[in-house]
């Protein structure tokens, strides 16, 4: 039988020590060689959401603004219902258009329906899916054309589109003369840069961005109320997932936000989709 022998740090002549467990050397300190592992619990860093104060609102003089198409993708104009010199009202249908994304969605669902229908003979459980796809396609086809609704009241000066024309987001579609009572200019605080202006709220519409300010239509108290909802938070309080931005409250609520701009001290200006009832968790560490 083999035994494993070794010499301790202070050898003792004539004594063999068989090691089946750890032995402290008689001449060594009991604490010598021992390592202490310390676990440090990291505390979450929280942040405050402050109101973005300092926006300035001014009644606009009589002016001409350009109405623009702001869809998610390109589209083809089908029917036009307005002309130069026409008085238009907020809510009037100015023209109709067929969006490319709408067409692509119809084609995708049609292919999915064809595949599900072809497999019905071998899987009767697909009947519910086929019925659901059929109803969805019928709904999309019955609403193929998108209506462009006038966001304001005014007089059409120039129509900038023609039937069958392809337009893209941001393309101007008409010039409209607006009375001063219908428009307001919104100026950001001096230390803020607006990358995206909130497009609309209840009863108001974003008309266009101009150098250093934006033009809105609607009642002034409603416009002021919209901008009072803009909050300023540290950059490390905003999380990103694909193309979406969101914040997480200390109550563990995840709230999507619209990133509107930033301040000179690298804070982010956001428009929360829900009220922020508590402070925010961040991705920073203490």
Image (spheres, rainbow, N blue to C red):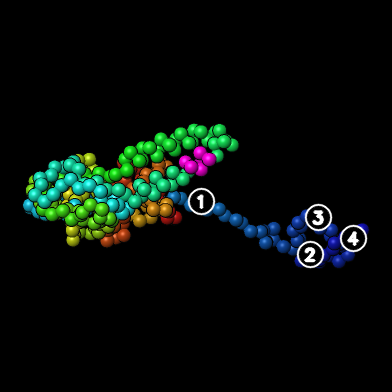
Q: Residues within 10 Å of mark 4 (few under 14, many from 20)?
A: few
Residue 112, percent from left and from top:
47, 43
At x 51%, y 39%, the residue is 117
Magenta range is 113-118
Helix, strand or loop at mark 3: loop
Residue 212, percent from left and from top:
18, 59
At x 56%, y 33%, the residue is 124
Q: Is residue 172 left or right of residue 21?
A: left
Mark 3, residue position: 20
Sequence-wise, which precedes: disc 2 or disc 4? 4
Q: Residues within 10 Å of mark 3 (few under 14, many from 20)?
A: few
Mark 1, residue position: 41
Helix, strand or loop at mark 2: loop
CA gap, disc 2 and disc 1: 39 Å
Q: Is residue 151 left or right of residue 137?
A: left
Q: Is residue 86 above or below residue 25?
A: above
Q: Main secondary structure of the magenta part?
A: helix
């Amino acid at each position: 039988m083999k035994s494993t022998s070794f010499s301790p740090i202070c050898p003792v002549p004539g004594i063999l020590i068989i090691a089946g467990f750890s032995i402290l050397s008689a001449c060594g300190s009991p604490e010598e060689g021992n390592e202490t592992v310390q676990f440090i619990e990291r505390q979450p860093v929280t942040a405050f959401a402050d109101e973005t104060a300092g926006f300035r609102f001014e009644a606009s003089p009589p002016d001409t603004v350009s109405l623009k198409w702001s869809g998610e993708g390109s589209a083809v104009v089908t029917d036009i219902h307005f002309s130069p010199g026409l008085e238009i009202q907020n809510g009037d249908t100015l023209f109709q258009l067929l969006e490319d994304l709408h067409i692509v969605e119809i084609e995708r669902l049609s292919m999915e329906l064809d595949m599900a229908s072809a497999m019905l003979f071998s899987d009767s459980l697909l009947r519910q899916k086929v019925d659901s796809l059929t109803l969805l396609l019928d709904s999309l086809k019955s609403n193929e054309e998108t209506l462009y609704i006038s966001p304001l009241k005014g007089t059409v000066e120039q129509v900038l589109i023609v039937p069958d024309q392809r337009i893209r987001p941001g393309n101007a579609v008409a010039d409209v003369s607006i009375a001063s009572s219908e428009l307001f200019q919104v100026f950001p605080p001096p230390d803020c840069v607006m990358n995206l202006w909130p497009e609309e709220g209840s009863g108001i519409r974003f008309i266009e961005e101009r150098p250093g300010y934006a033009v809105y239509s609607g009642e002034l108290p409603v416009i002021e109320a919209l901008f009072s909802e803009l909050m300023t938070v540290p950059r490390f309080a905003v999380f990103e997932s694909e193309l979406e931005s969101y914040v997480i409250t200390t109550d563990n609520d995840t709230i999507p936000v619209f990133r509107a701009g930033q301040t000179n001290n690298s804070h982010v200006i956001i428009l929360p989709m829900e009220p922020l009832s508590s402070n925010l968790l961040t991705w920073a560490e203490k």
